């Protein structure tokens, strides 16, 4: 293993190697932990050597975004625009799940990178090749929002039914030591249900798993695809009836 690492470090430095090492480091430790000095140390070079390939940290982030977006599958050919958009969005979701830091990096870029613009342009182009009007496509892209990257903000980040000792529980631990008191927790949940019965009903409708991104126990992938399919079905119906935003 050590010999393999030494061999890797002796490889000639180029932009692609710098970016791939940066992506791997961000995957492992988060993008906040990424520094030019740490990256240089990992690559076995002095920090100044990196600047021959990336002018600064912002350019490094741009290149990292380009690599991740490049992992998204190419658009499928054919008349099934709905299936093509669906597959593309789900491919984007898989790519960004492999690199949890990437969505924030994409959103933080002051100017979208060429790969980001290429991806968005291709999604729009798929709608247009499917016959959707410019008007409907414009509103469809707004409706998709960040979902075009495979993610969306969730309404219920955690369930009131979460483990009382779980730090992710919205009610929090019942004592400063974090041990929690199940009786007090249960009473608080009953009080919440009495005051907000419909929220409680929906939030506790499914068992929640604390590891879920959606919020403990909801199936992340199912919830995402459910909403995506609703949107795509809606776009298709509007397209079939000749919808336009001006009511014409």
Image (spheres, rainbow, N blue to C red):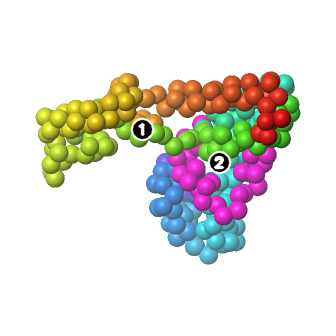
**Foreground pick, 114 / 185:** 185
Q: Earlier in the sequence, mark 1 or mark 2?
A: 2
Instruction: Give the main secondary structure of the magenta stretch.
Output: helix
Residue drawn at x 13%, y 34% as measured from the top left: 183
Q: How many numbered circles does the render carry? A: 2
Residue drawn at x 45%, y 36% as measured from the top left: 214
Where is residue 34? Give x, y as percent. 51, 62
- On the image, numbered disc 1 is attached to which residue? 156
Residue drawn at x 21%, y 38% as measured from the top left: 188
Could you classify mark 1 by the number of other residues whose Cα lies within 10 Å: few (under 14), some (14-19), or many (20 or more)?
some
- On the image, numbered disc 2 is attached to which residue? 68
Do labels 1 and 2 touch, CB within 8 Å?
Answer: no
Where is residue 102? Give x, y as percent. 58, 51
Q: Is residue 3 magenta?
A: no
**Where 28 sits versus 132, above or below?**
below
**Where 134 sits versus 2, above or below?**
above
Instruction: Specify the segment rendered in magenta.
Output: 94-121
**Foreground pick, 90 / 169:** 169
**Foreground pick, 63 / 91:** 91
Element assignment for label 2:
helix
Please say whether residue 226 is visible from this viewpoint: yes
CA gap between label 1 and label 2 equals 28 Å
User: Which mark lies nearer to you, 1 or 2?
Assistant: 1
**Foreground pick, 26 / 153:** 153
């Amino acid at each position: 293993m050590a010999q393999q690492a030494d061999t890797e470090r002796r490889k000639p430095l180029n932009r692609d190697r710098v970016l791939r090492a940066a992506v791997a480091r961000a995957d492992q430790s988060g993008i906040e932990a990424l520094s030019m000095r740490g990256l240089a140390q990992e690559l076995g070079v002095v920090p100044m050597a990196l600047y021959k390939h990336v002018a600064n940290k912002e350019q490094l982030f741009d290149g990292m975004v380009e690599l991740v977006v490049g992992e998204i599958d190419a658009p499928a050919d054919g008349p099934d625009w709905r299936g093509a958009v669906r597959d593309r969005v789900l491919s984007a979701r898989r790519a960004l799940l492999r690199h949890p830091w990437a969505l924030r990096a994409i959103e933080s870029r002051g100017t979208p990178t060429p790969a980001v613009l290429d991806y968005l342009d291709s999604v729009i182009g798929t709608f247009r090749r499917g016959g959707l009007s410019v008007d409907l496509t414009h509103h469809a892209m707004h409706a998709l929002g960040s979902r075009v990257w495979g993610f969306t903000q969730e309404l219920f980040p955690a369930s009131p039914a979460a483990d009382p000792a779980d730090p992710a529980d919205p009610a929090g631990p019942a004592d400063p030591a974090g041990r929690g008191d199940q009786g007090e927790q249960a009473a608080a949940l009953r009080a919440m249900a009495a005051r907000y019965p419909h929220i409680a009903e929906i939030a506790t409708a499914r068992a929640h798993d604390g590891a879920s991104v959606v919020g403990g126990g909801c199936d992340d992938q199912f919830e995402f695809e459910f909403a995506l399919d609703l949107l795509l079905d809606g776009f298709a119906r509007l397209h079939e009836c000749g919808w336009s935003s001006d009511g014409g």
